[in-house]
Structures are given as structure tokens and as C-alpha cells.
Image: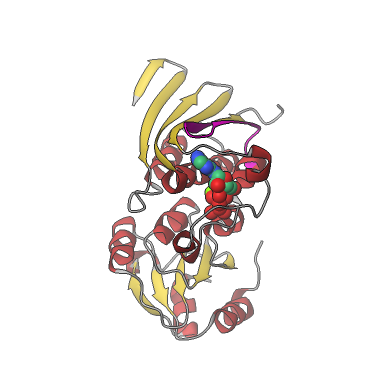
Amino acid sequence: MKTREIIKTLQLEVLTGQETLDTEVTGGYTSDLLSDVIANSKEGNLWITLQIHQNIVAVAKLKDLAGIIIINNRKPDKDTLEKAAAENIAVMISKEMAFEVSGKLYELIGSQD
Amino acid sequence: MKKSDEHVLSQQFEIKGGDFSNAGKTSTSIKEILQEIGIDTSIIIRAAIAAYEAEMNVVMYAQRATFTLNITPEKLCFKVEDEGQGIDNLDMAMQEGFSTATDEMREMGFGAGMGLPNIKRNADRFKIFSTPGKGTSLDLTFFLNQDE
Ligand SMILES: Nc1ncnc2c1ncn2[C@@H]1O[C@H](COP(=O)(O)OP(=O)(O)OP(=O)(O)O)[C@@H](O)[C@H]1O
Ligand SMILES: [Mg+2]
């Protein structure tokens, strides 16, 4: 399933990376610890997190993630959005909490490993 | 990019301590180089994890570092030599969960104490040296031929 379809079902607000939304999503990874995400997320995963600072962009880029879903309607920092736009990384916002977002994503695509 | 002969590639990167706005640049550049020269994807993934964690440790705990990338037909080597506070107790630092990260760093999602263990897990060879008060250096090797 493509990021685009997930955005629709989960009612996400897309802030950056519009050109990447046809990426095939391979699963999700929910964590706020960067070392955990670097070690354990997989290419094509959507990363669900409350982190909003600029360093999340490098993590998503390094692991070729499909994008970052920021939970609980948190607003990413300005430099996060600038970096994400420059690196073409999709940053999306959900109004819901990590549990709901993860559950809905899992229902949609399961863990496709 | 400097190619000293046909089979060897060597490049150096400077990392500045405390510079969170450029953090991740060195590891991203290294990953791109590895992709360009066609290194096996599974090795790139392991090397990128190690490079990122090594880079972040410099950003968080050191003043500056030189990150040297060396590639031969057999192996990929990272040498990360920093000037900084060094590590008092290496055994402790290598333990999963041990961290001296500040509250501010933890709020950003750093300081899980997973960096060094992750580096060790992902490299085929791992060496760390540290002199408290002077600095730390990491020596990592990834073999390019699977059967090694
Ligand atoms: N280059 C370094 N210079 C000085 N101290 C270091 C260096 N690298 C690691 N350390 C020390 O070793 C500890 C453990 O490092 P490690 O990378 O495993 O975890 P962390 O950086 O604290 O957290 P994480 O990597 O999960 O964000 C650090 O908290 C720090 O005290
Ligand atoms: Mg670390």
C-alpha cells in the first residue's frame, strides 16, 4: 500500500515530501528513541513518533523510511520542515496518539516483513 | 573524492561536537558513497547504522573528530578519532542502557545507551580506545565478501 492511501485512511496532514507519496510502505515502526529507530526500522517503514526536532530527518533518510508520522497533533520545528523538504522526506501529522496511529496502520498493512 | 589507486578509496570527514544541526551529514554522505560504488545493500545498512551512531557520539560527547573512510576490494573501514572528554569506563559504556546523555539530549530521543552496542553488533570487527580527558577512537571493519 502506498503512503498516499494511508494518509487518506488515517487522515494525516502532509507537510513535506509530497513527491514521495507513491512509495510502497513496508510496515511501521513506533518509537521515540533514535538509536532504536536507526537499529530496528526497515526500509519503507512509516515512523510513528512524538519527536519533532530536526535530527529525525537524517534518521529517516539514512534508513530510507517512507516517512515520519508525528502524533498527537504536535507541530514539527521549522528547521525540521526545512530539512525534510530539502531531503524530500514525507513528514505528516496525526491528531491521534501513537497507540491509535500504530493500531490503524497495523490494521491496514500488518507487519510486512 | 580521492582515489589513491584503482582499488582503494579513501575519504575524510570532519565532525563538530555539539553541532546538532549538521548531525547525520557525515553518515549520510558515507552511505551515498557506498551506494555509488555498489556495495551490497545489507552491508550498507549495517555500515550506515554504525556510522550514524559513531557520528552522534561525537556530536554529543566530543569537541571534534575526523571520520576516515577506507575501502579496499576486501573491506570497508571506518576510523573515528575524536578530541573530547573520553570514556572513563569502557566496559560500562559498552553496556546496553548505559548513558551519560543530558536531559536535553534524552528529550530529543538520544541517550538510550544503545549506540555503542549497536555499532559493535553491526560491524564485523570493532575496536574502541579511549583516554579520559583526551579523546576516543573507534576502529570498525566490514568485510565485503560474505564468506568471511
Ligand atoms: N565519543 C565519545 N566520547 C566520550 N564519551 C562517549 C563517546 N561515545 C560514547 N561515550 C560515552 O558512552 C556512553 C554510551 O554511549 P552509547 O552510544 O552506547 O549511548 P548514548 O550515546 O548514551 O545513547 P544513544 O546512543 O542510544 O543515543 C555515552 O553516554 C557516553 O557517556
Ligand atoms: Mg550514542
Is B84 above or below relative to A79? above
Q: Quadrant of residue B17?
A: top left
Name which residue lies at 49% across and 25% down: B71
**Between B84 and A48, the one nearer to me in the picture:** B84
- Furthest toward the right, the residue is B147
Q: Quarter of the image containing the C terminus of chain B?
A: top right
Name which residue lies at 56% across and 31% down: B130
Q: Quadrant of residue A26?
A: bottom right
Q: Quarter of the image containing the N terminus of chain B?
A: top left
Q: Is residue A78 left or right of residue A65?
A: left
- Furthest toward the top, the residue is B5
Q: Is residue B37 left or right of residue A29?
A: left
Name which residue lies at 48% across and 66% down: B107
Q: Is residue B25 left or right of residue B145?
A: left
Across the whole image, how many numbered discs are drawn on residues? 0
Q: Position of residue A110 (x, y in %)?
A: 65, 73
Note whether residue B66 is visible: yes
Is B142 above or below relative to B103? above
- Name the colouring of the figure: secondary structure
**Between A69 and B20, the one nearer to me in the picture:** B20
Q: Position of residue A9 (x, y in %)?
A: 49, 84
Is B71 above or below relative to A27? above
* Magenta-span inclusion, residue B72: no
Q: Position of residue B78 (x, y in %)?
A: 51, 30
**Between B99 and B78, the one nearer to me in the picture:** B99
Q: Main secondary structure of the magenta part?
A: strand
* Magenta-span inclusion, residue B126: yes
Q: Position of residue B65 (x, y in %)?
A: 41, 34
**Between B10 and A72, the one nearer to me in the picture:** A72
Is B128 above or below relative to B105? above
Q: What residue range appears in magenta?
A: B122-137
